[in-house]
Image (cartoon, grey):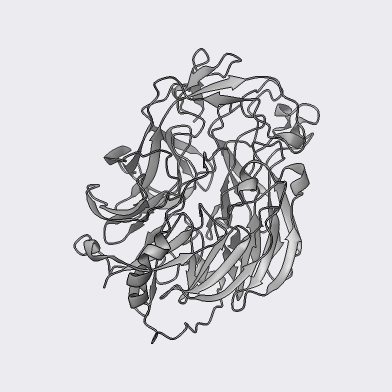
């Protein structure tokens, strides 16, 4: 995978806001005093309300809040309440977690607990960043924490899983769950399910062998590991001759979702390695570019569905698998919906993995002619395979969407997500795996005259049509910002012009924005303290919180 982040010159927005925000943070405010003790019942509650206890809010991946204080009629009155600066970060990707008035923020091997009303620091845990990492791990990004009981869990850049006391920030245990010297790293927030902490790694472009692992939340004891690349003799291993499975990619670098009724967790798996040359990995290359359904107690595979067999385009399937309970063609179904990087929205039966439908959303798309009745792409072999000279492929290797979070309103059955339209010239060549080097074989470039653009889309699940499209302005590099939606009919997201924005969910009409002065590479969330609703988003090196006056 590739998130095309670049070094950015950032504006000192915190200092510009200090006079205004200081007035909001009255010295009369006493530090928050909260009891933190998260149980299984707290995590399975959906939709979220005052608390936002996990990366996506709740296990469904919907990023939908039931709070109703902010509406289309008053959203224009939202004001910045505080800004929290993270000194070692320049492109935060974290979604804050909030429990009982305490916000947890991560970045660059740092964890912070802050008063969610004022942004004041409660505690700060820090460890040195790891030198010598490659590719995504070398950027030292971190997307957030998991929480269980009185403990929070975070990954480090070099694939350690840390357990901290949520009340003090004290380190309780530290487990190295992958070897960074073999190109592994970690960027994802952990997913905590019933006392088990589930983690994945980065490194899918660097020749690692992907896996999902589980650890005991209290002791840190290893519980199980699911290898996303089958070993010799296992189902799917025919794609991996010799020892190629050891360097085949297929990482889980975004957190999964979970259905407590089915006791099944769903994880998106990234591309195969090497990215652009499939000669050494014939066949479908399982379980890359797939969603896998696992038993969280054992790690046993229940089913899988592969979106892009034998991927040659870096079309990770790590986009959030959103869980939806709705009627589908007149029958109540447990559905899984994913807007995939390859340019199609997929609807699956999440109990069985049965393919139900695929709807194209990318306008620029030439790698496939469509999706057949079994859910397999109809490949355009003449026009969409990387070559030594270079082949123009659409979507480009950044995908028609990417890891930026979608959201779903269960009341209107509408999926909101960011799409991007751009083609890439992909080049293929021979490359042997070497530790300490990326494993793309070979690379990409922008086609002459190519002009990409980005949009916020609203997809109607009932009709498989798009309600509206909100085109984004583009000023340089695209953002990686995601979305959230509200029960009152709003969609919040980070736009392409460095603003936190709200639109009407019914029409896509813009209603409010706040320019952060910094590129946004994170997804928003909402919470409440003492009956007051807030919205928060990370931008550049700061986390901003907003509320009505």
Q: Position of residue 474 (x, y in %)?
A: 35, 38
Q: Residue at x 46, y 54 (%)?
A: 540
Viewport quadrant of the C terminus = bottom left
Count the labels in the image.
0
Residue sitting nearer the eye, 38 or 502: 502
Left or right: 127, with 124 as reference point: right
Q: Quadrant of residue 71?
A: bottom left
Left or right: 123, with 491 as reference point: right
Residue sitting nearer the eye, 84 or 152: 84
Left or right: 420, with 190 as reference point: left
Q: Quadrant of residue 452?
A: top left
Q: Residue furthest left?
A: 73
Q: Residue at x 46, y 47 (%)?
A: 404
Q: Position of residue 90 (x, y in %)?
A: 52, 53
Tell me, yes or no, if residue 264 can be seen here.
yes
Q: Residue at x 33, y 77 (%)?
A: 23
Viewport quadrant of the N terminus = top right
Q: Position of residue 308 (x, y in %)?
A: 54, 30
Tell me, yes or no, if residue 525 can be seen here.
no
Residue sitting nearer the eye, 316 or 129: 129
Q: Position of residue 423 (x, y in %)?
A: 44, 25
- Above/below status of 516 relative to 227: below
Q: Quadrant of residue 479?
A: top left
Left or right: 284, with 508 as reference point: right
- Above/below status of 12 relative to 420: below
- Above/below status of 157 relative to 402: below
Residue sitting nearer the eye, 548 or 340: 548
- Above/below status of 279 relative to 9: above
Q: Residue at x 67, y 29 (%)?
A: 274
């Amino acid at each position: 995978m590739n998130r095309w982040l670049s070094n950015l010159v950032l504006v000192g927005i915190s200092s510009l806001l200090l006079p205004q925000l200081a007035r909001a943070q009255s010295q009369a405010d006493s530090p928050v005093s909260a009891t933190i003790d998260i149980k299984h019942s707290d995590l399975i509650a959906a939709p979220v309300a005052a608390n936002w206890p996990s990366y996506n809010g709740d296990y469904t991946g919907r990023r939908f809040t039931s709070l109703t204080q902010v509406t289309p009629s008053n959203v224009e009155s939202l004001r910045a309440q505080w800004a929290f600066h993270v000194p070692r970060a320049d492109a935060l990707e974290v979604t804050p977690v909030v429990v009982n008035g305490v916000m947890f923020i991560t970045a660059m091997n740092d964890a912070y607990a802050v008063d969610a009303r004022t942004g004041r620091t409660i505690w700060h845990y820090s460890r040195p960043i790891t030198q010598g990492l490659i590719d995504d791990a070398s950027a030292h990004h971190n997307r957030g924490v998991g929480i269980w009981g009185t403990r929070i869990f975070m990954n480090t850049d070099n694939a350690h899983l840390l357990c901290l006391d949520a009340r003090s920030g004290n380190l309780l245990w530290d487990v190295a769950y992958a070897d960074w010297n073999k190109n592994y790293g970690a960027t994802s927030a952990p997913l905590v399910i019933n006392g088990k902490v589930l983690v994945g790694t980065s490194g899918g472009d660097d020749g690692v062998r992907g896996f999902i692992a589980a650890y005991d939340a209290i002791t840190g004891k290893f519980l199980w590991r699911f290898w996303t690349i089958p070993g010799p003799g296992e189902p799917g291993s025919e794609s991996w001759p010799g020892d190629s499975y050891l360097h085949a990619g297929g990482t889980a670098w975004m957190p999964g979702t979970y259905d407590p009724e089915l006791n099944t967790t769903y994880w998106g798996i990234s591309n195969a390695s090497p990215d652009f040359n499939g000669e050494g990995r014939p066949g479908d290359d399982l379980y890359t570019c797939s969603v896998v359904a696992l038993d969280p107690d054992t790690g046993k595979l229940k089913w899988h569905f592969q979106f892009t067999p034998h991927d040659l385009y870096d079309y990770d399937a790590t986009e959030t698998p959103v869980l939806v309970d709705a009627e589908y063609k007149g029958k109540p179904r447990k559905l899984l919906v994913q807007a995939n990087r390859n340019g199609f929205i997929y609807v699956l039966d999440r109990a069985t993995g049965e393919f139900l439908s695929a709807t194209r959303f990318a306008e620029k798309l030439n790698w496939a002619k469509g999706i057949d009745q079994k859910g397999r792409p109809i490949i355009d072999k003449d026009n969409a395979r990387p070559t030594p000279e270079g082949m123009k492929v659409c979507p480009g290797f950044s995908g028609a969407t990417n890891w930026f979070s979608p959201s779903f309103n269960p009341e209107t059955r509408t999926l909101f997500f960011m799409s991007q339209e751009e083609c890439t010239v992909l080049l293929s060549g021979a490359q042997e795996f070497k530790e300490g080097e990326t494993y793309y074989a070979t690379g990409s470039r922008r086609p002459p005259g190519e002009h990409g653009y980005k949009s916020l889309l609203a997809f109607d699940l009932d009709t498989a049509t798009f309600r509206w499209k909100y085109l984004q302005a583009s000023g340089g590099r695209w953002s990686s910002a995601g979305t959230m939606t509200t029960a009152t009919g709003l969609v919040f997201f980070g736009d392409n012009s460095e603003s936190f924005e709200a639109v009407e969910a019914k029409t896509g009409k813009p209603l409010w924005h706040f320019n952060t002065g910094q590129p946004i590479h994170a997804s928003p969330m909402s919470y409440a303290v003492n009956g007051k609703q807030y919205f928060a988003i990370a931008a550049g090196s700061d986390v901003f919180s907003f509320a009505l006056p």
